[in-house]
Amino acid sequence: MKINIAIDGPASLGKTTIGKKLSEKLEYQLIDSGVFYRYFAKKFYLDNIIQINEIYLFKDEMLNNPFYHLKEIEHVNSQFYQDLTKSQRASEIAKVPEIRSTINEIIQIITKKKGFVVLGCDATTKILPTAEIKLVLDAEIETRVCRRAKQILEAKSSQLDDLTELEIIGKVLSDILKRDFDAYELILEAKKVATIINTSNLSIEQVLAKILRYVYWYNFSSDNLLYIIIFMIIFFILTRSQPNQIVWPFQD
Ligand SMILES: Nc1ncnc2c1ncn2[C@@H]1O[C@H](COP(=O)(O)OP(=O)(O)OP(=O)(O)O)[C@@H](O)[C@H]1O
Ligand SMILES: Nc1ccn([C@@H]2O[C@H](COP(=O)(O)O)[C@@H](O)[C@H]2O)c(=O)n1
């Protein structure tokens, strides 16, 4: 049975990396809402003016052919993914309520068929509050700065060629702080409704394994709900009526 999985988390946490691996493993479709904001910022935020009518037109177009446009958005984003200025512009347009509701609506319509992993900082609360599995990935800020700085240094992005390692770390820190500030309320809200996984001391594989356990358990329990209830009733009756006489298998 296919379900929807919503994953929230603050900036540079590892959502994209984990989301990609998870969707590949489950053969689900990944939708990273951050990529929408970045794409909209690049395409529809020109000369400091947001082309809101163009955004509405794009929404209709996208809903006619969602998988083609998901690929296109992904492709455009991959060309400037590590550009920190682009994430700042994405954060600016993310403050416009019409843009937020348009992006949420597009994702809600596409995910009706189930079988999606949706990422964001409001995936569990605003985009997919009805997702079967809702998770918030978390990690201390120093872990996130290290992860992003390492990623940028390893990729040797040309925009940062002239900077020293310390300058890059400074830029990453200031970018994360700004984005944390913007997403603070949303992440707080998400933590109230979703299961929190602290990834600070976990490798990518360990985080993935943890999430997969939630997914397998969800599928197992919804497939076998009746048996689980019967087992619990029998267990409850046995423990109440003969608390000292239950013989467990393998007990001496
Ligand atoms: N558990 C982990 N342990 C170590 N490194 C990790 C872990 N999870 C992710 N990373 C690394 O952290 C870096 C940032 O990850 P990623 O780009 O997926 O974050 P993100 O949350 O999607 O960021 P953003 O909010 O900016 O879109 C990547 O280089 C990734 O390999
Ligand atoms: N659900 C979301 C997703 C993203 N944003 C804003 O867009 C910026 C870029 O997103 P990334 O996930 O690629 O970092 C992000 O910093 C947020 O400002 C959002 O508001 N809601």
Image (cartoon, rainbow, N blue to C red):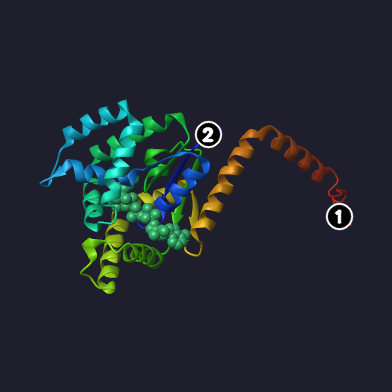
Q: Is mark 1 within 8 Å of ligand 1?
A: no
- Split into quadrants, the picture shows ligand 1 in the one at bottom left
Identify which residue is drawn at 32% across, 28% down: 65
Q: Is residue 229 at least partly visible in the picture?
A: yes
Residue 215's image quarter? top right
Which is nearer the eye, 244 or 212?
Answer: 212
Q: Furthest-top residue in view?
A: 64
Disc 1 to disc 2: CB gap under 8 Å? no
Give how far across and how far down residue 38 sits, in percent. 26, 47
Mark 1 or mark 2: which comes first in sequence? 2
Give how far across and how far down residue 67 sits, in percent. 36, 33
Q: Is residue 234 left or right of residue 116?
A: right
Which is nearer the eye, 161 or 185?
Answer: 161
Residue 54's image quarter? top left
Q: Quadrant of the C terminus?
A: bottom right
Cα gap from disc 1 to disc 2, whole angstroms: 39 Å
Q: Quadrant of the N terminus?
A: top right
Residue 174's image quarter? bottom left
Identify which residue is drawn at 67% across, 35% down: 224
Residue annotated with mark 1? 251
Q: Is residue 252 left or right of residue 214?
A: right
Identify which residue is drawn at 29% across, 64% down: 156
The numbered dot on residue 2 is 2
Foreground tag (1 vs 2): 2
In the image, what residue type sits under mark 2?
Lys
The numbered dot on residue 55 is none
In the image, what residue type sits under mark 1?
Gln
Q: Secondary structure at mark 1?
A: loop
Q: Residues within 10 Å of mark 2 (few under 14, many from 20)?
A: few
Give how far across and how far down residue 19 sits, in percent. 44, 48
Q: Is residue 210 above or below residue 153?
A: above
